[in-house]
Amino acid sequence: MKTIPRLAVLSALCLPLAGCFGGLKALKVTDFTEQRVTDLNLTKKVAGKRDFIFFSTTKMGVFLDGNIQGLITDYQGNPVEGVTVKVVSDSQARRGTDGGDPFAELAGENTSGAINFSFSPGLTDSMGLYKIHFSVPMTDNIVDMRGKLVYNPGWDQQKINLGKAYEPQIKETPFRLYYNMDSGFLAFAEGVRRMTVEPVGEGRGRMQALPGAKAPMPVQPVGKAPVAGTPGEPAGAAGQAEEDLFKGFDFGQ
């Protein structure tokens, strides 16, 4: 009979704790990222530690988890596997315009320990797709952070060590991730993007040739004879090859 009052006391003590780890609002998402940000969910994690005179307590915070995904190809549109993409968060974005820390309220006063932005590096698969898992804290039900995507960092050192590497044509791009839990508004803006164009046309016409570089020519497989008329083939090479084909036969002699 004594176990019943004990269970009642334990249940009463556990009810406030249950509110700390459960009861999160249903995640509402109005996606304006065109599937650039996916797999969103909310979690509660330790945001800091409060130190008192005789004891200390932990401070919990709400974090937004998800994935930033993208696609990497070569100039011909073929997916490239094994390219690393990393996120570097802007530490200055954590501070407001007045110089204060917007996460101070989340962590609380007399709190030790920093609130970190967590980003796992992404690696492209056989389809050229990469996913970067992130976990960022929310303040006032809002996520608003800035950073930059760094494409295949250390490619130059890899080229020196291995003799080959994928050099990114765009080394890094700035971005801004915004989410409002009340409205469900989700946005991912990726700064100024560089677009490549190629000059085309033959002859001078009514004006001089357009400036600019041509796209790189596709690499010929090793040991494969060049096709007649391909760029870089000497004039008359195809005819010479045909002539050499019949040189071994003594026709008319």
Image (cartoon, rainbow, N blue to C red):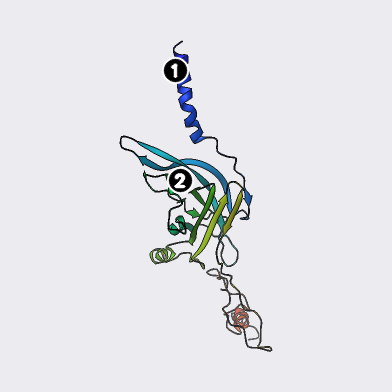
Look at label 2 and name its amino acid.
Leu
Residue 15 image point, x, y percent: 49, 28
Observer-nearest of 181 and 128:
181
Question: Could you say which quadrant of the image residue 125 lies in?
Answer: bottom right
| Labelled disc at residue 194 | none
Q: How far, Cα to Cα, is label 1 from label 2? A: 35 Å
In this rendering, is residue 66 above or below 5? below
Residue beneath disc 1: 6
Q: Would residue 250 be found to the left or right of residue 93 on screen?
A: right
Q: Look at 51% across and 62% down and name the residue there.
A: 174
Q: Nearer the viewer, mark 1 or mark 2?
A: 2
Indicate the secondary structure of the residue bearing disc 2. helix
Residue 235 image point, x, y percent: 60, 85
| Label 1 Cα crowd, 10 Å radius (few <14 / some 14-19 / many 20+) | few
Observer-nearest of 141 and 109:
109
Q: Do the residues labelled 1 and 2 touch (CB within 8 Å)?
A: no
Instruction: Locate the C terminus by quadrant.
Output: bottom right
